[in-house]
Amino acid sequence: MICDYEKDWFMRQISDMVRVVALTVFQKDRPEYKIEEETTTTSSDDLYRHTLKLLESREYQRALDYLSQNLSSERLSDLLVALDFYDKVNRLTEEELARYGLSREELLYSLQTIITLYELPF
């Protein structure tokens, strides 16, 4: 069983990792993905929209799976979508994460996997 301090540790690790990557790669304090133009959409825009739709309907595990399966290391903008996702999900309570089948440990592991995919030295 994971203790409260371990949960806090995972939460801080996710938060710190998201922030460091956002600052280093995008020069942003918070990784907020924004769709620039509604008339022309990019693959990253589509990834963001679908992931956000799943988040809004509280399908967190499906959102994580969708993001992992559709992320392209060829598009740096997909990394920003992913960081935005992890930032949002990391703000959920432990109870909400558990209710929908996620743990912070799983989030940290999948975030580390994405960072490795982009060959970032963290």
Image (cartoon, rainbow, N blue to C red):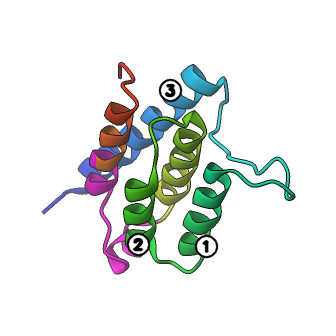
Horizontal side, residue 95 vs residue 1: left or right:
right
Q: Which secondary structure, mark 1?
A: helix
Of helix, strand and loop, which one carries label 3? helix
Q: Is residue 68 magenta?
A: no
Q: Earlier in the sequence, mark 2 or mark 1?
A: 1
Foreground disc of the pair 3, 2:
2
Secondary structure under the numbered disc 2 in the rendered image: helix
What mark, if any, has residue 20 been given in the picture?
3
Residue nearer the viewer, 52 or 90: 52
Q: Which residue is mark 1?
A: 53
The answer to if 102 sits in the magenta stretch is: yes
Q: Position of residue 14 (x, y in %)?
A: 40, 42
Tell me the magenta residue range.
93-109
Q: Is residue 36 left or right of residue 24?
A: right
The quarter of the picture where the N terminus appears is bottom left
The residue positioned 45% from the left and 49% from the top of the image is 71
Q: Residue at x 36, y 18 (%)?
A: 121
Sequence-earlier tag: 3 or 1: 3
Q: Disc 2 marks which amino acid?
A: Arg
**Distance CA(mark 2)–CA(mark 1):** 11 Å
Most common SS among magenta residues: helix
Q: Please name whichever residue, 102 or 39, is drawn nearer the observer in this view of the structure.
A: 39
Q: Is residue 92 above or below residue 95?
A: above
Q: Which residue position is annotated with label 2?
A: 62
Q: Amino acid at mark 1?
A: Lys
The CA span between labels 3 and 2 is 26 Å
Report which quarter residue 80 is drawn in. Answer: top right
